[in-house]
Amino acid sequence: MEKSLSRRKVICAVAASAVALTTTPLRAREPIVHDVAIKAFTFEPGLVQVQVGDTVRWTNNDLAPHTATADAFGWDTEEITKGEVGEIAVTEDMETSYFCAFHPHMKGLIEIL
Ligand SMILES: [Cu+2]
């Protein structure tokens, strides 16, 4: 009798921790897409605040082609032509400062919250 009770306690504890694991969110919300407009040779907004798992999406509104390229080239949308989009998935260790490979004075920042 004593033995089965303690076994039940163990099972309950395991079940409780399993519930805790599945109901504790890894992040506060579902992944979302952050839009950055490229307009008049600027990234707008110049700073996007994101969470791991989100996507950053650049839309080029200029006639000239642009890129969003990490400063140390860890990621790159490659060429985005007029009216097209480029997307990058946010990862934990990604570089957070970027520029346009064609126009290096164009700079943007990603802040991972
Ligand atoms: Cu550019």
Image (cartoon, rainbow, N blue to C red):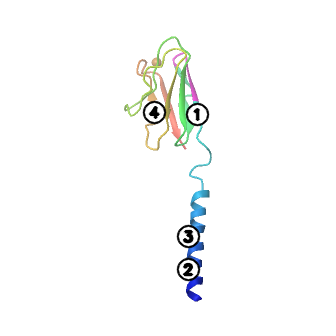
Query: Quarter of the image containing the C terminus?
Result: top right
Q: How would you rate the neighbour count of disc 4 (Cα within 10 Å): few for under 14, some for 14-19, many for 20 or more? A: some
Marks 3 and 1, the one that precedes in the sequence: 3
SS at badge 1? strand
Where does the image place residue 86, in percent across and percent down from the top left? 50, 25
**What amino acid is at disc 2?**
Arg
**What amino acid is at disc 1?**
Val
C-alpha gap between disc 2 and disc 1: 47 Å
**What amino acid is at disc 3?**
Val
Tag 1 near tag 4, CB within 8 Å: no
Where does the image place residue 4, in percent across and percent down from the top left? 57, 83
Tag 3 near tag 2, CB within 8 Å: no
Between disc 1 and disc 4, the foreground one is: 1
Whether residue 52 appears in magenta in the rendering, the answer is no
C-alpha gap between disc 4 and disc 2: 54 Å
Please determine whether, in this image, residue 33 is positioned above or below residue 25: above
Magenta span: chief secondary structure? strand
Q: Name the residue tied to disc 1.
A: 33
SS at badge 2? helix
C-alpha gap between disc 3 and disc 1: 37 Å
Q: Name the residue tied to disc 3.
A: 14
